[in-house]
Image: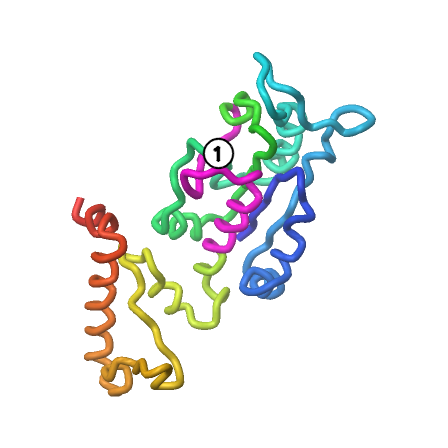
């Protein structure tokens, strides 16, 4: 898989691309992630990429020309399964979308910044508008990292135990059951005996029971959506 990310703050991705699962997946050529600086297409001597909004008001808006050139420099080279913009009005990212996106070959992500993106760019190029929740962050860079990470860990070979990803929270609309490791007793709290039993059938049944219990207590909306 190839992921291209368009941003006006490319250095924010430096450590992200070299650490943990993402870094290993890139090193092992399981995924390739390429960062594109909008300022390479900025206007004039100072490579301007933003301007004040028409109609007045606070903040600066990303100008259409540099963004269009940035996007088209990518789309001329390859066809993308999805061109994603991260905006407050977007659909909230859910595991079902991540699962589907992990099957794509090429993804282009466009990171907004400042007060926003000229709407004409969204209208012209976006095939998917996404959000990470009902709150505001400085730009689309953090959402792009989150989505890239969520997608990459589902690609075969990205993590050591592929079954682990299939047992994560939100797969099958359930939270993961509680997990434990050594020691068996910590601060007078013991690991559930069933996990020490060696009976894999009973362990599996316990985990499913705990997943439903945890979900019903903490995120009953997930069970409601499953029933609907």
| Viewer-nearest residue: 112 or 184 | 184
| Residue 85 image point, x, y percent | 51, 35
Q: Residue at x 39, y 64 (%)?
A: 165
Q: Residue at x 49, y 57 (%)?
A: 152
Q: Which residues are magenta?
A: 124-151
Relative vertical location of residue 139 with respect to residue 123 in this rendering, above or below: below
Q: How is the image coloured?
A: rainbow
Q: Residues within 10 Å of mark 1 (few under 14, many from 20)?
A: many
Disc 1: which residue: 87
Relative vertical location of residue 169 with respect to residue 208 in this rendering, above or below: above
| Residue 68 image point, x, y percent | 62, 27
Q: For numbered disc 1, what is the local secondary structure?
A: strand
In this picture, residue 160 sits left or right of residue 216: right
Relative vertical location of residue 89 with respect to residue 132 in this rendering, above or below: above
Quadrant of residue 129 in the image? Answer: top left
In this picture, residue 172 sits left or right of residue 119: left
Q: Can you say which quadrant of the picture contains the C terminus?
A: top left
| Residue 205 image point, x, y percent | 19, 73
In this picture, residue 43 sits left or right of residue 8: right
Name, please, the residue furthest toward the right. Answer: 45
Q: Is residue 138 magenta?
A: yes
Quadrant of residue 131 in the image? Answer: top left
| Viewer-nearest residue: 216 or 23 | 216
Relative vertical location of residue 147 with respect to residue 40 in this rendering, above or below: below
Q: Residue at x 42, y 31 (%)?
A: 89
Q: Residue at x 62, y 31 (%)?
A: 72
Quadrant of residue 175 in the image? Answer: bottom left
In this picture, residue 71 sits left or right of residue 150: right
């Amino acid at each position: 898989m190839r992921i291209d990310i368009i941003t006006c703050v490319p250095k924010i991705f430096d450590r992200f691309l070299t650490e943990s699962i993402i870094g290993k997946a890139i090193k092992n050529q399981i995924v390739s992630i390429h960062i594109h600086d909008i300022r390479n297409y900025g206007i004039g001597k100072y490579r301007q990429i933003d301007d004040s909004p028409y109609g007045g008001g606070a903040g600066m808006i990303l100008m259409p020309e540099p963004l269009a050139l940035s996007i088209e420099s990518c789309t001329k080279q390859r066809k993308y399964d999805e061109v994603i913009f991260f905006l407050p009005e977007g659909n909230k990212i859910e595991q079902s979308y991540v699962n589907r996106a992990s099957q794509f070959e090429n993804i282009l992500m466009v990171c907004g910044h400042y007060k926003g993106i000229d709407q004409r760019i969204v209208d012209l190029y976006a095939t998917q508008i996404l959000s990470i929740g009902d709150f505001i962050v400085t730009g689309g860079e953090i959402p792009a990292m989150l989505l890239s990470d969520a997608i990459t860990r589902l690609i075969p070979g990205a993590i050591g135990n592929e079954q682990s990803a299939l047992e994560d929270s939100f797969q099958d609309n359930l939270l993961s059951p509680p997990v434990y490791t050594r020691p068996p007793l910590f601060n007078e709290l013991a690991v559930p005996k069933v996990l020490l039993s060696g009976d894999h059938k009973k362990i599996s049944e316990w985990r499913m029971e705990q997943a439903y219990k945890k979900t019903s207590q903490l995120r009953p909306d997930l069970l409601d959506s499953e029933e609907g």
